[in-house]
Image (cartoon, rainbow, N blue to C red):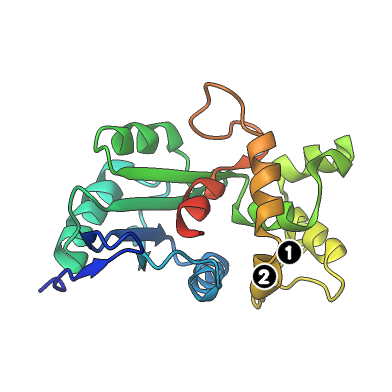
Amino acid sequence: MPRERQEFFRESNSKEKERIYILAFEGNVTEVEYFEEIKSYQRFNDELVHLHLLKRRKSDTNSSPKYVFSKLKREAKEEYNFNDQDELWMIIDTDRWKNIREIINLCSSEGNMFAAVSNPCFEFWLLLHVKKFSDLLDEEKTNLLQNRKISNKRRYIDKLLGDAMPDGYNKRNPRTARFILLVDHAITESRNLVVEGEDYPKGLGSHVYKIVEKLLK
């Protein structure tokens, strides 16, 4: 059974139903840890946020968006009592999902379902906490977009994050609390990379800022 929705008073003394945000990931440690830190941050705006694991069939090498989307919508309603006032966000990367356009179109058809896409990956959003995009060399930008493996355990983005952090970066233990106090810088940098008319970044960029802004006071 889905949980019961509570009523509460905002600072304006207006009585409202709780609003739910469901953030759906594909099982990455980094994203889950980051948004758990957001929820414990003093500027978190007291909405209800649920972190939901996206599950794909192993045979779905091209993401099968319609299957994942319909399954996610069904689970949201069954598990969280999801309704029209709530929002569901798919936190996805271009290097893992190959049918981004189809996912965007499916979300647009719903009205309260959205996709926060990072190109090439969520770690680029983290990088924007600690780097100015304008400080990156052209070669670094090219390498970031390709984000190739530089070892069995690391990709290029991991190297740049490691270079930017005084105590390094390990994607198996990202320690995302280090980034939260710099979130305003990341939002500004992300906004500067937005291309008018693009509903997801075709070049380097991250639209994670859209949901983060909603969750912060």
Q: In the figure, 32 relative to 16: above or below?
A: below
Amino acid on which disc 2 is placed: Lys
Q: Residue at x 60, y 51 (%)?
A: 121
Q: Residue at x 16, y 73 (%)?
A: 3
Q: In the figure, 15 relative to 108: above or below?
A: below
Residue bearing mark 2: 171
* Furthest residue in direction top, as rendered: 197
29 displayed left or right of 16: right
Badge count: 2
- The picture places residue 166, in percent across and down from the top left corner, at 87, 72
How dense is the environment of label 2, judged by Cα within 10 Å: few (below 14), some, or many (20 and up)?
some
- The picture places residue 195, in percent across and down from the top left corner, at 61, 26
Looking at the image, do the residues carrying marks 2 and 1 touch, with CB atoms under 8 Å apart? Answer: yes
69 displayed left or right of 179: left
Secondary element type, mark 1: loop
Q: Nearer the viewer, residue 58 or 19?
A: 19
Q: Nearer the viewer, residue 12 or 182?
A: 12
73 displayed left or right of 57: left
The nearer-to-camera label among 2 and 1 is 2
Q: Does the image show residue 147?
A: yes
Tell me which label, 2 or 1, sits earlier in the chain.
Answer: 1
* Furthest residue in direction left, as rendered: 1
- The picture places residue 16, in percent across and down from the top left corner, at 21, 60
Amino acid on which disc 1 is placed: Arg
Q: In the figure, 197 relative to 217: above or below?
A: above
Secondary element type, mark 2: loop
Quadrant of the rendered image containing residue 176: bottom right
Q: Does the image show residue 62?
A: no
Q: Tag on residue 154?
A: 1
Quarter of the image for the N terminus: give it. bottom left
